[in-house]
């Protein structure tokens, strides 16, 4: 629901967000009250010492004050439990209760200060009583400090302006005044987000690329968040509901219309070959991460294997440059790829915004020159990821409408300049002129590798690219179709990154708004059930939503009430296609897509997988929605992907009776 309005401004907290913090405070206060009461009853006979009368009065007043606070907090918890997310009517008294609760902090602060002063004066009474008073003073100030910290966290810098979801007066929605006010709110939101990004990335440099990335990131966040009136807990509840709704739809016996995209016979024929290539080249994509990923994958032996080389200096005939702890990185690269030192042409761990680390090596097994681009590992890489607006690509091909993700295309241009202008590829092919060029990467590196392969297609027509878990919001439609001839992408399970684009985020926001607007349970119950469902599973059939009507009382707030008037998503219907902002047109993943899809219900823990995977070619439309689940993040991790690939490839190689066409299944235990 919309954030609460207190002291004339909106806050990033709703009236139904106070159940859990209220219960916690209530537990602390009740235990505290019982402890003080026992202290007073057991030691009141020992308070006939000098100053004991003051301490006796202090304890009595403290008991009364705590009782009043306990009653107020109990009322806050009870009221916060009422209603639903979009039906705040039963909680209309919450603001008055909060004013009373905040007012009670004043006598509590005064009494805690007096208690500290009296103890500091050295009152000569029973030591147990003195220690009890000290404990009450400490607890009082801890609760006051935590409350002040909470106020800082839920403070909304834009709360003093008109709330995004409130009607903008009696004028028409498309009036000039409404447009101006909405534009002003978005400008203010962009400024606030840019300040937040600068503070979070305070250790990043201040060059031109960084400033552009700050602005792009702030523009993305303000575009996505400024037209909704949701608090963070609403989004968490919406994601929990979507996950259960998603699993319920999957297990529903009702027939659903499925649009199939049958891959060509040439695709099915080379599935095994391309899967084996992916398994081989994933080692290079993982090696580009350097020693952190290697040590993470080998927690017991990794440090011993690379530690000896960290302080050792090497000389080489080739141009190995860049980065801190280069020898540590290079030792892990040798361990991961199994190559020799002489097989590497160039290793760079130079890392800035729009400038990614990469390596160039000679792969004699596959007779290829491999360029591996590193994925996200730093704040600079995150800023590159979040520069998500589109920009044109100038390619030497006949493809029209060439657009790509700005941050990733800038990173690909940097690697291209290094490879071509600095003569790195020329040096590699002078050593092995008969080899072919292969570009690989994981995550952000996969997106950069795909764009780099597009740039290198003209001078190196035989170039191939293997993109592991690439971002969806990468290429325009025409470039996506063009890339199918020489780029293969690999996606594991519910991995969120290959489904992540601004268009899909807008769709996710619309689905969250819809499921919240049709929710018939209080938020605290949704969050409790959601946590249980994520941790332990259960039946998704008992959904706390009624999408087709039923006994749900008409909510006071609906989907439109949670959107800004005049925003692009305001006039959506549940069946209408979603229009993207002009700065963020629909973008697509690169190349043909191999999907390693887990059969049945997804497991709750990826540490000890016991799953069955189907390997098949998939169409990009199968990744047009973000799927919610416990593995949506872990399926993106390179170590998980490598482990699944190892099992899938070995099992397929051992299975002589596997079908030659269509998807096939392998067990992963």
Image: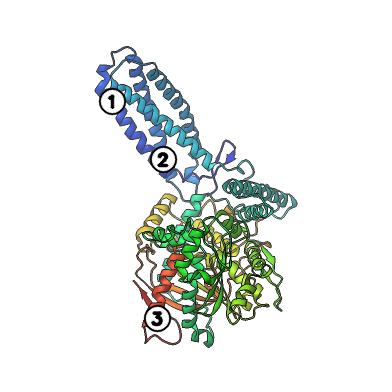
- Taking the image as shown, residue 157 lies to the left or right of residue 526, namely right
The local secondary structure at tag 2 comes to: helix
Q: Earlier in the sequence, mark 1 or mark 3?
A: 1
Image quadrant for the C terminus?
Answer: bottom left
Q: Which mark is residue 470?
A: none
* Rendered view: 130 above or below 299: above
Q: Give the Cα separation between the discs numbered 1 and 3.
A: 71 Å
Depth check, mark 2 against mark 1: the one in front is 1
Reading the image, the residue beneath label 2 is 22
Residue located at (45% from left, 48% from top): 83
Q: Earlier in the sequence, mark 2 or mark 3?
A: 2
The local secondary structure at tag 3 comes to: helix
Report the label total.
3
Q: Is residue 284 visible?
A: yes
Q: Position of residue 168 (x, y in %)?
A: 67, 48
Reading the image, the residue beneath label 1 is 39
Q: Give the Cα separation between the discs numbered 2 and 1.
A: 25 Å
Reading the image, the residue beneath label 3 is 652
Q: Tell me which corner region of the image, top left, top right, bottom left or bottom right, holds residue 608.
A: bottom left
The local secondary structure at tag 1 comes to: helix
Asked whether 86 or 237 is in front, the reply is 237
Q: Position of residue 352 (x, y in %)?
A: 61, 56
Asked whether 449 or 510 is in front, the reply is 449
* Rendered view: 580 above or below 178: below
Answer few, some or many: residues within 10 Å of disc 2's Cα (few below 14, many 20 plus, some between 14 and 19).
many
Answer few, some or many: residues within 10 Å of disc 1's Cα (few below 14, many 20 plus, some between 14 and 19).
some
Q: Are the residues flagged by discs 2 and 3 in contact, CB closer than 8 Å?
A: no
Answer few, some or many: residues within 10 Å of disc 3's Cα (few below 14, many 20 plus, some between 14 and 19).
some
């Amino acid at each position: 629901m919309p954030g609460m309005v207190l002291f004339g401004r909106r806050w990033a907290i709703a009236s139904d967000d106070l159940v859990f913090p209220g219960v916690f405070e209530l537990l602390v206060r009740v235990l505290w009250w019982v402890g003080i009461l026992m202290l007073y009853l057991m030691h009141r006979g020992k308070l006939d010492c000098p100053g004991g009368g003051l301490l006796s009065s202090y304890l009595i007043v403290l008991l009364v004050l705590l009782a009043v606070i306990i009653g107020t907090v109990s009322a806050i918890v009870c009221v916060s439990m009422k209603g639903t997310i979009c039906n705040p009517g039963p909680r209309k008294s919450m603001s008055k209760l909060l004013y009373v609760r905040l007012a009670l902090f004043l006598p509590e602060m005064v009494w805690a200060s007096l208690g500290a002063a009296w103890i500091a004066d050295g009152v000569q009474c029973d030591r147990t009583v003195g220690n009890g008073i000290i404990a009450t003073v400490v607890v009082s100030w801890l609760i006051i400090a935590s409350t002040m910290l909470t106020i800082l966290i839920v403070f909304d810098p834009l709360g003093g302006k008109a709330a995004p979801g409130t009607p903008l007066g009696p004028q028409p929605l498309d009036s000039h005044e409404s447009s101006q006010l909405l534009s002003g709110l978005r400008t203010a939101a962009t400024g606030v987000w840019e300040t937040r990004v600068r503070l979070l990335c305070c250790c990043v440099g201040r060059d031109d690329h960084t400033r552009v990335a700050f602005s792009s990131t702030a523009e993305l966040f303000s575009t996505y968040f400024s037209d909704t009136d949701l608090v963070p807990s609403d989004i968490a509840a919406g994601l929990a509901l979507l996950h259960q709704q998603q699993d319920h739809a999957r297990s529903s016996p009702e027939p659903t219309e499925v649009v199939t995209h049958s891959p060509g016979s040439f695709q099915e024929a080379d599935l095994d070959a391309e899967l084996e290539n992916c398994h081989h080249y994933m080692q290079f994509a993982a090696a580009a991460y350097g020693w952190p990923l290697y040590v993470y994958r080998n927690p017991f032996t990794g440090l011993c294997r690379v530690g000896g080389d960290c302080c050792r200096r090497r000389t080489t005939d080739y141009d190995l440059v860049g980065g801190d702890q280069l020898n540590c990185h290079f030792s892990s690269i040798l361990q991961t790829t199994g190559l020799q030192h002489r097989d590497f042409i160039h290793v760079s761990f130079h890392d800035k915004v729009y400038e990614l680390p990469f390596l160039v090596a000679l792969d004699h097994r596959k007779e290829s020159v491999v360029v591996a681009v590193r994925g996200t590992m730093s704040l600079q890489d995150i800023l590159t990821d979040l520069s998500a607006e589109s920009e044109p690509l100038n390619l030497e091909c006949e493809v029209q409408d060439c657009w790509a993700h700005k941050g990733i295309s800038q990173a690909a241009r940097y690697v291209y300049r290094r490879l071509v202008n600095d003569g790195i590829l020329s040096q590699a092919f002078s050593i092995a002129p008969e080899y072919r060029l292969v570009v690989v990467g994981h995550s952000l590196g996969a997106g950069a590798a795909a764009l780099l392969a597009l740039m290198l297609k003209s001078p190196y027509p035989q170039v191939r690219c293997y993109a592991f878990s690439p971002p969806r919001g990468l290429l325009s439609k025409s470039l996506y179709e063009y890339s199918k001839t020489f780029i293969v992408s690999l996606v594991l399970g519910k991995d969120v990154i290959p489904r992540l684009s601004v268009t899909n985020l807008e769709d996710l926001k619309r689905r969250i708004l819809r499921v919240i607007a049709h929710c018939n349970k209080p938020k605290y119950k949704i969050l409790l059930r959601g946590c249980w469902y994520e941790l332990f599973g259960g039946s998704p059939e008992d959904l706390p939503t009624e999408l087709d009507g039923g006994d749900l009382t008409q909510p006071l707030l609906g989907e439109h009430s949670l959107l800004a008037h005049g925003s692009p998503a305001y006039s959506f219907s549940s069946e209408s296609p979603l229009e993207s902002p002009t700065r963020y047109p629909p973008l697509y993943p690169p190349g043909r897509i191999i999907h390693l899809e887990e059969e049945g219900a997804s497991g709750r823990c990826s540490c000890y997988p016991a799953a069955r995977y189907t390997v098949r070619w998939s169409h990009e439309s199968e990744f047009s929605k973000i799927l919610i689940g416990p593995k949506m993040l872990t399926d993106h991790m390179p170590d998980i992907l490598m482990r699944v690939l190892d099992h899938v490839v070995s099992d397929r190689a051992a299975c002589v009776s596997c079908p030659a066409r269509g998807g096939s299944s392998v067990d992963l235990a």
